[in-house]
């Protein structure tokens, strides 16, 4: 004979009835809450309207008078000065956070209180990084063997070796090249140590160009002698011999490599006149991120939200007093 408990159908009906009643109470509570909200808005429509108009007016005023602008300058740190560049930008940003207007004025920044932040980051350009540089290609390939290539090309060890870097800074209100950009670049180019390296590097580049020009002239002389010898020789078998001469091919390849190097050296001279060479810049791009430029919407909602919260708090207080028979 089984001892399992018997389920009473009446108990099930009672449970379902209680569940239905609870669901009905919840729905009714929500309807009451919604209706109370409508009544609250109806009673306070004038106050809510005034708060909206005042908040919108204040928001428009703040948006007009507290505009934030972003600025960018693309630079090339020369002579191995990438770490120097990053440390100087970090120092300036630290001084901005500290509110050290004296330091910022000393480096030539006009209206330093308008400067809110500054940062520098590399422009990831893997193709330029490995172009005609077997050593960089092998290094990148070796590092990618133990990890994700995307992470490798963006991590500090790799990224600081890229040619171009972007300095980004933000100001409260518009700025000009004279007020901010030129003082900043002048400060970055004041290193006595790198100025000495720059001087010697430019001397080496000019010397290399001069020596390469001399070698190219010598090659041209050899080629002219060869051309004259060929034109004076009337035997076709001799001509074939000269065309297949591997030493002549090596000379031609050497000349081609020297011409390519000369072009690169002259381009290097163009970008090496400064320690940190600016490539291009963009000033006064309005920043509309986060709350910038949106105060006309945020402040009215904030005012009305505070008013509603105070109304709910007042209603809760009265209910508690009534519950305790204090009113």
Image (cartoon, rainbow, N blue to C red):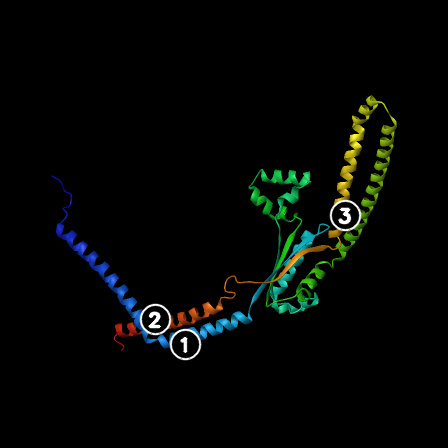
Q: Quadrant of residue 246?
A: top right
Residue 314 position within the rendered picture, expressed as x and y whole percent measured from the top left: 34, 74
Q: Is residue 214 or residue 245 the one in the foreground?
A: 245
Residue 35 position within the rendered picture, expressed as x and y whole percent measured from the top left: 28, 68
Q: Is residue 155 or residue 264 the one in the foreground?
A: 264
**Rendered residue at 24%/64% (across/down):** 28
Residue position marked by numbered label 2 in the rendering: 312
Residue position marked by numbered label 3 in the rendering: 266
Residue 235 lies, with reference to residue 82, above or below; the image says: above
**Rendered residue at 23%/62% (across/down):** 25
Task: Look at discs 2 and 1 and give the one toward the viewer.
Answer: 1
Disc 2 from disc 1: Cα separation: 19 Å
Query: Helix or strand or loop: what does disc 2 sit on?
Result: helix
Residue 246 lies, with reference to residue 37, above or below; the image says: above
In what quadrant of the picture does the C terminus appear? bottom left
Q: Which mark is drawn over residue 50?
A: 1
Q: Is residue 21 or residue 289 the one in the foreground?
A: 289
Residue 110 position within the rendered picture, expressed as x and y whole percent measured from the top left: 67, 68
What residue occupies the far left of the structure in this picture? Answer: 1
Does label 2 or label 1 sit earlier along the sequence?
Answer: 1
132 sits left or right of 12 in the view: right
Disc 3 from disc 2: Cα separation: 74 Å
Q: Which mark is drawn over residue 94?
A: none
Query: Helix or strand or loop: what does disc 1 sit on?
Result: helix
Does label 3 or label 2 sit earlier along the sequence?
Answer: 3
In what quadrant of the picture does the N terminus appear? top left
Query: Helix or strand or loop: what does disc 3 sit on?
Result: helix
**Rendered residue at 42%/74% (across/down):** 51
**Rendered residue at 19%/57% (across/down):** 18
84 sits left or right of 57 in the view: right
Residue 16 position within the rendered picture, expressed as x and y whole percent measured from the top left: 18, 54
């Amino acid at each position: 004979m089984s001892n399992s408990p018997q389920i009473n159908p009446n108990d099930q009906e009672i449970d379902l009835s209680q569940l239905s009643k609870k669901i009905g109470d919840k729905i009714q509570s929500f309807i009451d809450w919604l209706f109370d909200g409508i009544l609250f808005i109806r009673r306070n429509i004038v106050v809510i309207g005034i708060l909206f108009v005042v908040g919108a007016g204040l928001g428009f005023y703040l948006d007009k008078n507290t505009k934030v602008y972003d600025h960018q300058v693309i630079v090339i740190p020369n002579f191995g000065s990438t770490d120097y560049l990053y440390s100087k930008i970090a120092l300036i940003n630290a001084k901005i956070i500290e509110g050290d207007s004296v330091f910022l004025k000393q480096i030539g920044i006009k209206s330093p209180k308008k400067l809110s932040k500054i940062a520098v980051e590399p422009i990831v350009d893997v193709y330029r990084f490995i172009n005609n540089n077997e050593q960089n290609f092998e290094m990148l390939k070796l590092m990618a063997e133990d990890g994700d290539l995307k992470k490798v090309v963006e991590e500090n060890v790799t990224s600081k070796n890229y040619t171009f870097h972007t300095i980004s800074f933000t100001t409260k209100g518009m700025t000009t090249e004279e007020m901010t950009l030129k003082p900043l670049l002048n400060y970055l180019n004041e290193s006595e140590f790198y100025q000495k390296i720059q001087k010697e590097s430019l001397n080496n580049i000019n010397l290399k160009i001069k020596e390469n020009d001399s070698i190219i002239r010598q090659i041209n002389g050899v080629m002219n002698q060869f051309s004259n010898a060929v034109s004076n020789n009337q035997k076709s078998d001799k001509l074939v011999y000269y065309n297949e001469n591997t030493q002549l091919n090596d000379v031609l390849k050497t000349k081609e490599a020297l011409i390519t190097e000369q072009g690169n050296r002259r381009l290097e001279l163009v970008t090496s006149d400064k320690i940190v060479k600016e490539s291009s810049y963009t000033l006064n791009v309005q920043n509309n991120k986060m709350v910038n430029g949106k105060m006309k919407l945020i402040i009215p909602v904030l005012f009305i939200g505070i008013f509603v919260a105070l109304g709910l708090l007042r209603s809760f207080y009265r209910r508690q007093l009534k519950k305790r028979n204090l009113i």
